[in-house]
């Protein structure tokens, strides 16, 4: 158990920091070099009153272990009632309806969420509507219902636990890493990156893709890829930004980064002072994109350039989709409707 400040100092002192390339042609927020750019978490308490949590207050932090992470498996033979698995592999997949010939998706929720939260419910339903698949939902709610900083400091340990679990599936069933696709929201987006990094470390192979849905902003930094999603974590990383610079990370950190409505504020989210509405739009857009053929986006340097037509002849890409557009590269912009259906085509 370590106080938060000591943990942060230790992390800064001992982590080998890999610095990503910073390019003027991609969206880059200079402030995101500083992990302490935001010092207070604005959120709602149990009775929905706004409070401000000091991100530097000393909190007891214990490292996540396998009992802290549960995994729920849905297949075509159990669409709504999951098989409950242990992340240490003590519950064999052979006792479930797992089918190694089908696509495999791992969904990971964010802070103050669990396996039944809206992100998982909506994305799972969308996948099931269009294909037969094994859908694993990672539940690390025993960690995410703690203070934010305790959850933040366990992103990498949880990712390592799930990465080891995926590696055990690969070796037991003789499956390639390319059969696995990871989807995560907020803190779960960064967990997904750490899952991919752990699979790579164990197997020297990359998972097929990561879809990072408005990856969390608070305490993460552009210069440290050890605990956040990064292009090195999968063969292809797509990032959808919907609440950049508040709850979501603003800088481009994927192979392709999409900024609907500019990536910060979302239409229909009026008086969104906490950012929770815009933050959640990432998974609503993504869920809709799986089922629809919409969300045409244009390679562009900014929303104003997109809106004035300067990018209309540039490369186009479909944001989201069940199988992401791996030909895309750079930053993409689009506008959405203020309510469902969100796609404008």
Image (cartoon, rainbow, N blue to C red):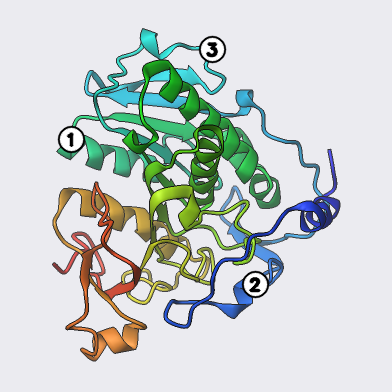
- Name the residue: 43% across, 48% down: 234
Q: Residue furthest front?
A: 204
Side of 233 where 339 appears, left or right: left
Lower position in the chain sequence, tag 3 or tag 2: 2
Q: Report how far apart the C-alphas of labels 1 and 2 lie in the structure.
A: 40 Å
Tell me the quarter of the picture where residue 179 sits.
top left
The residue lying toward the viewer, choosing from 339 and 167, is 167
Residue 270 at x, y = what percent?
Answer: 39, 73
Q: Position of residue 32 (x, y in %)?
A: 61, 72
* Left or right: residue 76 compared with residue 18: left
- Asked if 246 appears above or below 239 in the picture, the reply is below
Q: Which residue is depicted at the point 50% across and 48% down?
A: 193
Which residue lies under the disc numbered 3? 90
Residue 214 visible, this angle: yes
Cα distance between the residues tagged 1 and 3: 29 Å
Q: Quadrant of residue 33?
A: bottom right
Inspect this view and state whether residue 260 appears: no
Helix, strand or loop at label 2? It is: helix
Residue 328 x, y percent position in the rendering: 28, 64
Q: Which residue is mark 1?
A: 131
When the figure is inspected, residue 104 is found, relative to residue 244, above or below; the finding is above
Please state which of residues 246 and 155 is positioned toward the viewer in this rendering. Answer: 155
Callout 3–callout 2 Cβ contact below 8 Å:
no
Q: Secondary structure at mark 3?
A: loop
261 in relation to 70, above or below: below
Label 3 crowding class (10 Å Cα cut-off): few <14, some 14-19, many 20+?
few
Q: Determine which quarter of the picture holds residue 145.
A: top right
Tell me whether the residue at label 1 lies in contact with that at label 2, contact meaning CB atoms closer than 8 angstroms.
no
For marks 3 and 2, give the CA distance. Answer: 41 Å
Q: Image quadrant for the C terminus?
A: bottom left
The image quadrant where one finds the N terminus is: top right
Marking on residue 33: 2
């Amino acid at each position: 158990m370590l106080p938060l400040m000591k943990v942060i100092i230790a992390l800064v002192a001992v982590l080998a920091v890999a610095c990503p390339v910073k390019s003027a042609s991609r969206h880059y927020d200079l402030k995101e070099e500083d992990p302490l750019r935001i010092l207070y978490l604005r959120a709602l308490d149990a009775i929905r009153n706004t409070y401000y949590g000091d991100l530097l207050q000393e909190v007891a932090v214990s490292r996540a272990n396998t009992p802290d992470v549960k995994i729920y498996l849905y297949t075509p033979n159990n669409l709504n009632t999951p098989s409950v698995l242990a992340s240490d592999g003590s519950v064999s997949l052979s006792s479930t309806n797992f089918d190694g010939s089908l696509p495999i998706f791992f969904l990971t929720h964010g802070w103050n969420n669990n396996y039944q939260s809206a992100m998982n419910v909506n994305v799972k339903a969308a996948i099931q509507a269009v294909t037969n698949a094994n859908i694993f939902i990672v539940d690390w709610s025993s960690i995410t219902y703690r203070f934010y900083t305790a959850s933040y400091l366990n992103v990498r340990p949880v990712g390592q636990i799930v990465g080891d679990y995926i590696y055990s599936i690969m070796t037991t069933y003789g499956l390639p890493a390319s059969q696995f696709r990871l989807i995560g929201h907020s803190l779960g987006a960064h967990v997904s990156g750490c899952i991919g990094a752990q699979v790579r470390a164990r197997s020297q192979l990359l998972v097929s893709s990561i879809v990072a849905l408005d990856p969390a902003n608070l305490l993460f930094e552009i210069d440290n890829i050890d605990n956040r999603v990064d292009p090195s974590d999968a063969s292809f990383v797509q990032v959808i930004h919907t609440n950049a610079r508040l709850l979501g990370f603003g800088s481009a950190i994927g192979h392709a980064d999409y900024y609907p409505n500019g990536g910060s504020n979302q239409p229909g989210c009026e008086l969104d002072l906490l950012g929770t509405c815009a933050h959640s739009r990432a998974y609503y857009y993504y869920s809709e994109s799986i089922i629809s053929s919409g969300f045409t986006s244009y390679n562009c340097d900014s929303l104003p350039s997109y809106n004035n037509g300067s990018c209309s002849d540039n490369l186009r890409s479909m944001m989201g989709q069940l199988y992401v557009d791996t030909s895309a590269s750079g930053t993409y912009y689009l506008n959405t409707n203020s309510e469902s259906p969100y796609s404008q085509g």
